[in-house]
Each structure stands twice: as structure tokens, then as C-alpha cells.
Amino acid sequence: MEGEKKVVAMEEEVKEEVVAVDVSLKQLSKKLDDFAKERNWEQYHNPRNLLLAMIGEVGELSELFMWKGEVPKGLPGWGEAEKEHLGEELSDVLLYLIRLSDMCGVDLGDAATRKIVKNAVKYPAPSK
Ligand SMILES: [Mg+2]
């Protein structure tokens, strides 16, 4: 019971933080680093382990779409609990991706920005 209250309090704290802050990749990266350090999990966070963990989470994300057929934008017909679960699985993938990037020495924000530019050069928008 006491543990349940603690979880609810932590969830409230996170909700307030999420509402108040436009979170950056660097902030998430720092939180992940602190989280791992506090639990002495850095020893497990090598690139291979993180990649495999991320792939596992992609599988969990895929399960949510499995057997649903075509899923329209906005997910009409999905309940709140299902959408919340989707948000959790998307977050798991993102967090492992950020951690993997960090453990590989890749600045993900910088790399993603450069990739968008590269894509724009490779696939120019049609002139109007
Ligand atoms: Mg998951």
C-alpha cells in the first residue's frame, strides 16, 4: 500500500514535469545516465545490450498494431488505456535509442538534424 502511494506520487511528479517542460534529447540523456548510475546499471549498458533491448521494445510496440489491419492516423477507435500503452512503448524505444547513441558517442540530435538535411538534398521537394 505504501509502495503504491509512492508510485502515484512519483507519477504525479512526472506529470507536472512533463507539462512544465519541453523536454530535449540532452535532458532525457542526462536522466537516463542518472537512472543507470543510481542503480549501478552502467555495467550492462554496452552498445550491443542496448541495441538488443531496443529491438525488444520495437517488438512490444509492434504487438500493439498486430492484427489490427490498417490503422488510420489519430488512432480512432483506440481507447485511452491503449493509447497510454502506445506512449509507453514509443518511449521505451526512444529512451533505448538515446542511451544507445550516448554509449556509441553519437550526438543523436546533431546526427538527426544532419540526416534531415542530407535527405532534403537527396529528395528535393518538387518546385511549385
Ligand atoms: Mg516496453
Image: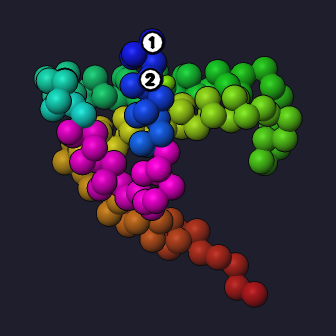
Q: Which residue is mark 2?
A: 5
Residues rendered magenta in the picture: 15-34
Q: Is residue 4 left or right of residue 85?
A: left
Q: Position of residue 29 (x, y in %)?
A: 28, 47
Q: Residue at x 78, y 20 (%)?
A: 67
- Asked where in the image residue 55 lies, by quadrant, the reply is top left
Amino acid type shown at disc 1: Met
Residue 101 seen in render: no
Contact between marks 2 and 1 (CB within 8 A): the answer is yes
Q: Residue at x 72, y 22 (%)?
A: 66
Is the CB–ligand 1 distance for label 1 below 8 Å? no
- Asked where in the image residue 78 lies, by quadrant, the reply is top right
Q: Which of these two is toward me, 53 or 39?
A: 39
Disc 1, SS: loop
The residues tagged by marks 2 and 1 sit, at their Cα atoms, a distance apart of: 6 Å
Is the CB–ligand 1 distance for label 2 below 8 Å? no
Amino acid type shown at disc 2: Lys
Q: Which of these two is toward me, 8 or 31?
A: 8
Residue density around tag 1, few if under 14, some if 14–19, many if 20 or more, within 10 Å: few
Q: Position of residue 13 (x, y in %)?
A: 42, 42
Q: Which residue is mark 1?
A: 1
- The circle on residue 71 is none
